[in-house]
Image (cartoon, grey):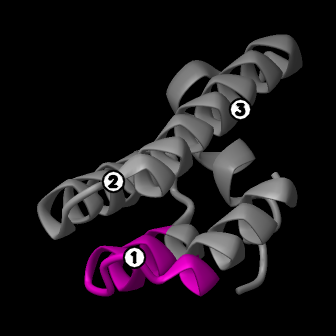
Amino acid sequence: MAYDPGAIDATLAAAVGEDPQLIAELRHAFVESAERCIASLRAAESADAWRGAGMRLKGLAASFGAVRLMALAEEVAAAPHDMRLVARVERTLARF
């Protein structure tokens, strides 16, 4: 799953203007939120908890314009406890 070059920055710039410091802060908040979703996936004890964490990740990705991460999160939500997909999410997130 490849990183969408500039997709998040473009989405943020459209929302808040061209302030690079604010964009960097919002990108950091996005990554922290995504990391919490990943932690929820790892801690999920049931398929419902897993799906919920996957859908939160999908919503987060959608709100920041991270289309490929959004698609991957949808795959995750549909495959409870597939840690290979979690590893793919982590690799994708590392590119942000």
User: Which element carries disc 3, helix, strand or loop?
Assistant: helix
Q: Position of residue 53 (x, y in %)?
A: 32, 52
Quarter of the view holding residue 11: top right
Kindly state the secondary structure of the residue where label 1 is placed: loop
Tell me the mark number nearer the camera, choosing from 1 and 3.
Answer: 1
- In space, the residues marked 2 and 3 are separated at their CA atoms by 26 Å
Question: Which residue position holds label 1?
Answer: 81
Relative horizontal placement of residue 94, taking residue 53 as reference (left or right): right
73 in magenta:
yes
Res 24 label:
none
Range of residues picked out in magenta: 70-85
Residue 44's disc is: 2
**Residue 86 rendering spot, x and y as whole percentages:** 58, 71
On screen, residue 28 above or below 34: above
From what the image shows, is residue 80 above or below residue 53? below
Kindly identify the residue that appears in the image at 74 percent across and 68 percent down. Answer: 92
Where does label 3 land, which residue? Answer: 27
Secondary structure beneath disc 2? loop
Calculate the distance from the C-alpha at mark 1 to the C-alpha at mark 3.
27 Å
Q: CA distance from mark 1 to mark 2?
A: 8 Å
Discs 1, 2 touching: Cβ within 8 Å: yes
Residue nearest the viewer, comparing 37 with 44: 44
Q: Tell whether label 3 touches label 1 (CB within 8 Å).
A: no
- Hey, which quadrant is residue 94 in on the image? bottom right
Q: Is residue 54 magenta?
A: no
Looking at the image, tell me whether mark 1 or mark 3 is earlier in sequence order.
3
